[in-house]
Amino acid sequence: MSTSNDKEPLRITSDDLARVVVPEELPLATSGQPSSGAKSYGSITDAADKAPAVAEERGSVLLQGWFYLGAAGLLGSLLAWGLCERAFIDGAGGHRWGNVLMIPVIITFMCLGFGLAESLVERSIQKALLRGILALPLGIVLGFMFDFIANIIYTIGLSICAEMGVQSYRNPAVWIARGLGWAVFGAAAGTVYGIVGQSWKKAKYGIIGGLIGAGIGGMIFDPISMATKGGSVSRAVGFALVGIATGVAMGLVESALKDRWLYVTAGPLAGKQFILYKAQTSIGSQQQSDIYLFKDSNILAQHALIGISGSRVMLKALGPAFVGGSPVQTRMLQDGDLLQVGRYAFRYKERHRS
């Protein structure tokens, strides 16, 4: 018996099924392409700080110490020769101020050139001016002092040659005597080079290199004079080679004996090496910095400091700096570390002692 609550059974026909519309499946949002309206909070693998991409560059030979010091010695000696040659008298025809001042002036200008060279290569005009102001009076004093010492050594050498029966300037014994005497010119140049660089170790390396280079230049002076038949041309060529040899030897000795240094692998100074002589080396965009970095507005006036205490070399970053691609504030540098500051990259190197 049916009641009023009974309902008609639900009937679904094939026509009803045909009219059903199934909505398309919504695409799933991926981690890299979020769906419209969805918020993205990044991925845990995203790097918060990355080192700027800096490609290693080929270094220029113009930034090698042996090259720019050799060029400084060449220019300094030729400039001094040009000033004094016009007042120089050959032979026994008498003496003028050129005969007296040529060697001291050559020493002075070589010292000045070596004092300016490194700062000019680093494009620090202010530092070059300050070093020039210091190098010039030092060169004048040492020029006369070392010329006097060189004459004494050369005179003693000639006396020894005479005792050995040597009577001609064509004898190599005389060349050696001149080389030993003129070696002290290089010692003067190395002394000034170290003083303006504010480092005794730099002076020591400069003196060693200067002695070797000027000594070699002195020994080839007489053969050059014989080959060019004497006169002004022989002096120009001879003194030019003395200047070149002194500068090249200073640069080579300094590079060979260095303990710790930064080699620039990228940036405007790619190929330059900064030898770490001082207990604290400053890096920044101000020209007075020990390592002056120019053409980069992201580099602070004082961007970083490198301190040396015994065998420890500690980097303290005052601005953004990266070692091995990771940001650092303080870091003890290890041989081979890659330091990046702005557009510049440096490879820290140490000399391994056996």
Image (cartoon, rainbow, N blue to C red):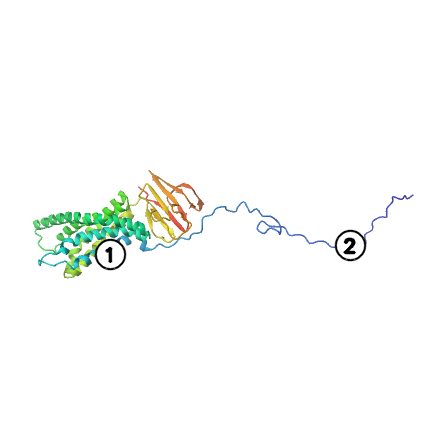
State if disc 1 and disc 2 touch (CB < 8 Å).
Answer: no
Kindly identify the amino acid type of the residue bearing the numbered disc 1: Leu
Question: What element does badge 2 sit on?
Answer: helix
* Residue 237 vertical placement versus 43 (above, below): below
Circle 1: element type: helix
Which residue type does callout 2 highlight?
A: Leu
How crowded pointer 2 is (Cα within 10 Å; few <14, some 14-19, many 20+) is rated as: few
Relative to 331, is 134 on the left or the right?
A: left
Calculate the distance from the C-alpha at mark 2 to the C-alpha at mark 1: 101 Å
- In the rendered image, residue 102, in percent from the top left (x then y), is placed at 16, 54
Which of the two residues, 191 or 27, is positioned nearer the viewer here? 191
Percent of width and height locating residue 11? 83, 51
Please tell me how crowded label 1 is: few (under 14), some (14-19), or many (20+) other residues with Cα within 10 Å.
Answer: some
Q: Quadrant of the C terminus?
A: top left
Q: Is residue 351 above or below residue 171?
A: above
Whether residue 344 is visible to the viewer of this picture, yes or no, is yes
- Residue at the extreme top: 310
Q: Which residue is mark 2?
A: 17
Name the quarter where the N terminus is drawn. Answer: top right
Residue beneath label 1, please?
Answer: 75
